[in-house]
Amino acid sequence: MSHDHDHDNELDPFAARVRALETILTQKGLIDPAAIDVIVDTYETKIGPRNGARVVAKAWSDPAYADWLRRDATAAIGSLSYTGRQGEHMQAVFDTEDTHNLVVCTLCSCYPWSVLGLPPVWYKAPPYRSRAVIDPRGVLEEFGLTLPAGRKIRVWDSTAELRYLVVPMRPKGTDGWSEEQLAGLVSRDAMIGTALAKEPA
Amino acid sequence: MNGPQDLGGQMGFGPVAPEKDEPYFHAEWEKRALGVTLTAGAMGAWNIDESRHARESLHPADYYASSYYQIWIKALEVLLKRHGFITERDLVAGKAVDAAATPKRVLKAADVPAVLAKGGPCDRPVATPARFRAGDRVRTKNFNPTGHTRLPRYARGKSGTIEAVRDGFVFPDSNAHGRGENPQWVYTVVFDGAEIWGEGADPTLVVSIDAWESYLEPA
């Protein structure tokens, strides 16, 4: 193994299992290890929550874009060149003073890769997947988010091939901000629904 | 199937543990696991529904003891064996021993950007008009199929309202088992928290699922 410098992993039986599988498939000519390198590089450096943050910032800045995003998120997001795997069928959901949106996949780990990148571990793990639909307020508290008592919570369980992007409310005190500045207020968690947009410093 | 993957409303898993500034990968092998899973899938021998079903078919004790990339790899080994690409002898030897089936294609590095950018759309034309409209009251089926389904247990036999008619989509319950795409209309269906969770439910909660038409009956 040439490029793996993490010596703890050298001892990990699961690392050995994955390596063996890659070796077998490569020796049989079924996969191209260089393709794996490109996939990893894509999701480490090219596709991540900055994509989604730009979508949200544009929606905050441009009412016509926000309207398009509401009607046809796949096309509106695609116009920014964010397309592809696990973002083929997009739906944007907008937070309001009345309703907070929260996205989960109780059955597996469906997540809008094209705009948020690879999902965090907690999104794929049983505590979040089990409780988001029955105790969303309790879950949000664990992210340090306490919603006003009367605010409705809408939980979107991604049980089919639609992928959801939450558009949080634009923070006050950001009039005149550029889209680039606004995008800096939009975290990955705010687009899942486990956070709000950051307040301007 | 009523498998370990069907987690909505289950209890006892403890608090969510968000990690500050979480990296995309927690070990080098996770990168290879992602890539092996995607490149093997690109051979075209199985679809996303079959791979989801392979993951949820792990023994529950194994599923719950595994990280998500571990679940992926364990299911991938099952798929590769099922479709004739690897054998137990290969795995025991840790190298290619037996001959493999011929894949439809091999994903080359140069083609990765285009393949990822294209994705795998699964909307399909449906010959019949949509049975329901936004605002219709519906009831989800009560069933317990032994095969793959995307109707979670917590949402079976419940009354809700059609919020949106989506597109026609490949029907996972048949597609996962090689019985064809059989596309159906998909609807977003909303339920009051109390309808699903009953006594003690959060009164401010509304839950929605995306449901294929055959999961629904008029209420």
Image (spheres, coloured by chain):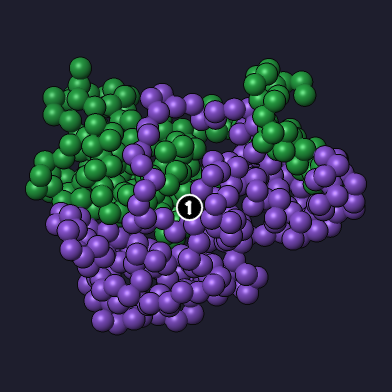
Chain colours: A green, B purple
Q: Quadrant of the N terminus of chain A?
A: top right
Estimate the x, y position of residue A120 in percent, counting from the top left.
Answer: 45, 36
Is B76 on the left-hand or right-hand side of A159?
Answer: right
Residue at 16% in and 51% down? A152
Name the kind of residue labelled 1 in the image. Answer: Cys
Where, by quadrant of the figure, is residue B84 drawn? bottom right
Q: Nearer the viewer, residue A65 or A70?
A: A70
Q: Nearer the viewer, residue B212 or A62?
A: B212
Residue at 59% in and 66% down? B176
Does A72 sit above or below residue B191?
above
Q: Nearer the viewer, residue B82 or B15?
A: B15
Q: Is residue A178 visible?
A: yes
Dot 1: element: loop
Query: Residue pushed farthest left?
Result: A150
Q: Residues within 10 Å of mark 1 (few under 14, many from 20)?
A: many
Residue at 19% in and 25% down? A199
Estimate the x, y position of residue B27 in percent, counting from the top left.
Answer: 59, 27
Estimate the x, y position of residue A165 in percent, counting from the top left.
Answer: 35, 45
Residue at label 1? A108
Does B30 sit above or below residue B185?
above
Does A147 sit above or below residue A106?
above
Is B131 on the left-hand or right-hand side of A150?
Answer: right
Label 1: chain letter: A
